[in-house]
Amino acid sequence: MSQRRYRILLLVCVFVCIYSLCLACQPARRPLANQPELLSTELEQICGGYDQARMLGHIRELTSPAYEGRAVGTEGERQVAAYLTSQLALWQLKPWTELGLTDFRHSFSVQKTKIRGQNVIAVRRGTTDQWILLVAHYDHLGVKHSTLYPGADDNAAGVAILLETARCVALAPQAPQHNVAFVLTSGEERNLSGSKALAALLRRQGLAQRCRVVNMDMMGGTGGNSLDVWREPSRPSGRQLVRQVRQIITDAGLKSNVVRRRFGAVDSRSFARAGMPSVTLSWAYQVRYHPHRHQTTDTFDELRPELLRKAAQGILRIVWLLANTS
């Protein structure tokens, strides 16, 4: 063999060895998308861990007069943030370190005021660099003219469903394919202040292009039979996300409508404007099913537990399936 051929063969061998070593050092990825039976089994395990009593307990806690209606910047909001943080800490979830956070709290300012609020965020790590954000605002209107606004439907119900979803996902023995961030925003009732601040931070940190957002608002109500979807206009478009979410809902045996108009702005708008495909889910969006919105009568007793169970089971499926498919 000529010296030139020998050198070429040696270089090829070295390349093959280095390539093989690189492959061996790669972290194992879960091949879920091509294994529907495995994914279905995992999903049933996740849903089987759902605890209705625990979820309802969170709503009772959040609507307690002790929290003074959870208005942003108040002592009640700070106490709720402490409660949420203590719950998330039980399940070995992690801070979102890519955002520069060292704990579960993300502080922000309400624009044109001296008010400071706190978002609460915890993450379940996956095996890719993509993110699914499950969002619900925990603030409400507070106390006005010595009268408490409990905010059960708007939005203690969404917060309780998020907490129970976080618990089920955190305790799953297998990691999801994509990272999941459980985001509890404040300041939604004050011009979406908390979600705007978080969306701006995601852009600054170069994470926005890797995020998809599922927001929950008004997940309780007094009737209806559908888990409805509002798509925020965004670039890139959220149409594919809408299709995925609706398909998951209908596969779960629930009805789902695309909402053409909303009562007002919701947190998904902040994320969509920052370039993240975003949807908001509401239970039976029609006004007649949410007659207590922004009223003093928005109490735990006005909610329908069986509807909350359906909504929560739908959310569990949405989060786990989005986190494990492209």
Image: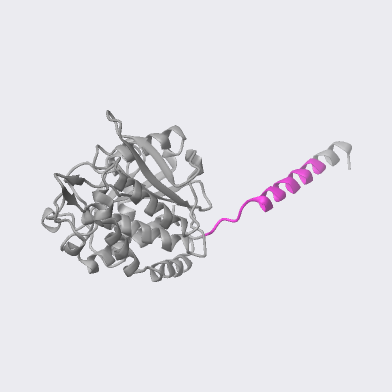
Query: Residue at left 30%, top 44%?
Result: 268
Is 308 placed above or below 294 here?
A: below
Query: Residue at left 18%, top 51%?
Result: 148
Q: Position of residue 221 (x, y in %)?
A: 18, 59
Residue closer to the observer: 25 or 86: 86
Magenta region = 9-31
Residue closer to the observer: 198 or 30: 198
Query: Residue at left 44%, top 60%?
Result: 169
Residue sticking out furthest to the top: 112
Is 261 placed above or below 63 here?
A: above
Q: Position of residue 157 (x, y in %)?
A: 27, 58
Which quadrant of the structure image shows residue 310?
bottom left
14 drawn magenta:
yes
23 drawn magenta:
yes
Q: Position of residue 165 (x, y in %)?
A: 38, 60
Say how many tags the image has.
0
User: Dominant secondary structure of the magenta stretch?
Assistant: helix
Query: Residue at left 47%, top 39%?
Result: 99
Taking the image as shown, residue 151 lies to the left or right of residue 24, namely left
